[in-house]
Amino acid sequence: MASLIPDETRVQLLGMFGEEFNRLDDFEQLIVTTAAIEGWVNHERACQLTTQHSREVTQPCRALSTEAF
């Protein structure tokens, strides 16, 4: 499966967060990548990135906002 994350962005995020980035699931990686590329991400923006119900987006957003990257 092709990744939606540009190679240069993945390298940058791995340099910043190491293996912690690889431990995130695909959606969590997409949220972090969006924040890196766009400079921010919120619940509404994360909902735009997926077809999941907004309640299903809340948990990853909450978890990532408290992660100690």
Image (cartoon, grey):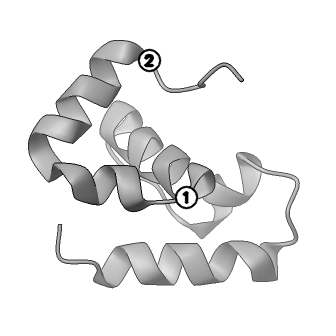
Residue at x 40%, y 35% (from the top left corner): 38
Residue 9 image-quadrant placement = top left
Q: Position of residue 59 (x, y in %)?
A: 60, 83
Say if 60 sits above or below 49 in the image.
Answer: below
Sooner in the amino-acid sequence: mark 2 or mark 1: 2
Side (left or right) of 4 relative to 21: right
Residue at far left of view:
15
Callout 2: 10 Å neighbours few (<14), some, many (20+)? few
Q: Position of residue 33 (x, y in %)?
A: 41, 40
Q: Position of residue 46 (x, y in %)?
A: 63, 57
What's the residue type where badge 2 is placed? Pro
Residue 25 image-quadrant placement = bottom right
* Foreground residue among 55 and 28: 28
**Helix, strand or loop at mark 2:** loop
Q: Position of residue 12 (x, y in %)?
A: 19, 29
Report the residue marked by disc 1: 25
What's the residue type where badge 1 is placed? Asp
Callout 1: 10 Å neighbours few (<14), some, many (20+)? few
Q: CA distance from mark 2 to mark 1?
A: 16 Å
Report the residue marked by disc 2: 6
Residue at x 36%, y 77% (from the top left corner): 65
Side (left or right) of 15 relative to 42: left
Residue at x 73%, y 59% (from the top left corner): 47
